[in-house]
Amino acid sequence: MKPTVVVVGLGPGEAELVNLATKKAIEEIPYRFLRTQKHPSAHIVKNATSFDYLYETLDSFEQVYDQIVDILVTQALAKEKILYAVPGSAMVLETTVEKLRLRDEIDSIVIPSISFLDLAWIELGIDPISSGIRLIDGINFLSQAVGEKGPVIVGQCFSSRILSDIKLSVDFSIEDKVVVLQRLGLADQAVFELDWQDLDKSYIKPDHLTSIYIPKLGPSFGTELVKLQELALELRQKCQWDQKQTHKSLTRHLIEETYEVVEAIGEIDLEQGYQHLEEELGDVLYQVFFHSILAQEEGEFTLEDVAKGVREKLIKRHPHVFAGKDVVNEQQALISWEKIKSEEKNRDSLMDGIPSMMPALLYAYKTQRNAASVKFDWPDLEGALEKLFEELEEFSQEISKDDSLDRISDELGDVLFSVVNIARHLNIDPETCLRQSTHKFQNRFRSIELIAKTSGKNLSNSSIEELQDLWEQVKTSELDN
């Protein structure tokens, strides 16, 4: 016979609502564990070990839940039989119980108990079956509410941040209402209606016994993504152009759309800048959907796999956020990122994995950055500047010798590489820097063309002195403005 964990629920409120079977189990089993002391009936589980300390020391709920289950299994193996008490009902929004029941090393016995939902139906005056209501976890509201139209009841709304996230993730009009349910079954219970836009106001004091009832859900962030995926699938099936596309044929479009995003970012300070950026980001997003659909047709991966993979990768590569690792500054965070990335890819060199077909400035920048991650770098800007002057001198010597173009090209490349190094030491993106200068040059040249056209001059017939004079006029005009 396997060791056993007997799971009991402490009901929604006062000890009077705890059933006899639960009380009997508490009396009979001497080894007792509490998920949390933060519950009105927790005091009836005497001499129990609480897991509240895990919530205070670990970085995520997932880590807390996994640790609780590991401890419970270990204790059950040692004691043969233990009791685990949770708030409310053991089968309602209890992730630890879900995980515990998946463990093969032990048997888990769940004793039925009253949930906060039983009291909520009474206060709301609704039949959960006929109304088709769904229960959603407030912690995971965004993912669980996708496609839901309501009504829904949202549990575990124990902080203002959770209420704010719920409010911001759904498109509601100002007429929509929400019902707040707090401390059901207690003497100070509160049930009140609230305007949707007031859900995260400071006068709402959420606690561990707070839930909300939403009669009708508006469209959510996730809903629009689902609609876009459905559209992409339909176009793939019905559009002659979409049907002929492959990963390779779409490469050009992905690159073009990415550059258009970069251009839109440069227009943010202009009128309608964000509107253009929103549109171009949508085009890039569609490319992601399209490539994922092509891969799904080949049985390789899906869009969900892409989203899951990047989420897990970001969590793993940010140990200073999710695993309590300390970093002092941005540079240390970047070094940590590159180290973890190298270990993941099992690469022999820090130079591996830098795409050689990316723009040359970015290619140089990433190469230098990876080398700098192991301190192969000038200690300060002065060293980088001295290297630039050295490369300029070597470039000048090759020109004076009237050497081959290959040698001159090689030395000019070293000069550009040194310029990128200086940009990196100044925390300036060389790609953006050069783009801005090129854009400035274009604007000035257009002004020269306009002046020449207005005065009846032909630029192609103008001398270099005349062109330089026009250039200086444009620069002076910029300074005056």
Image (cartoon, rainbow, N blue to C red):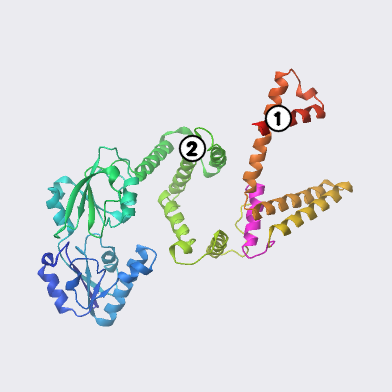
Task: Tell me which residue sits at (81%, 48%) in the image.
Answer: 408
54 lies above or below 396: below
Tell me the amino acid under the disc marked 1. Answer: Val
Residue carrying label 1: 474
**Distance (Cα) linking label 1 and label 2:** 29 Å
Quarter of image, res 113: bottom left
Horizontal arrangement in the rendering, residue 45 relative to residue 295 (left or right): left
- The magenta segment is 357-378
- The x and y percentages for residue 89 are 19, 63
Depth order, front residue of 172/249: 172
Q: Quadrant of residue 248?
A: top right
How many numbered marks, from 0 up? 2
> Quick check: 327 above or below 194?
below
Q: Residues within 10 Å of mark 2 (few under 14, many from 20)?
A: some
Task: Please tell me whether residue 2 belongs to the stretch shown in magenta.
Answer: no
Within 10 Å of the Cα at label 1, are there few (<14), some (14-19), or many (20+) other Cα atoms? some
The C terminus - image quarter: top right
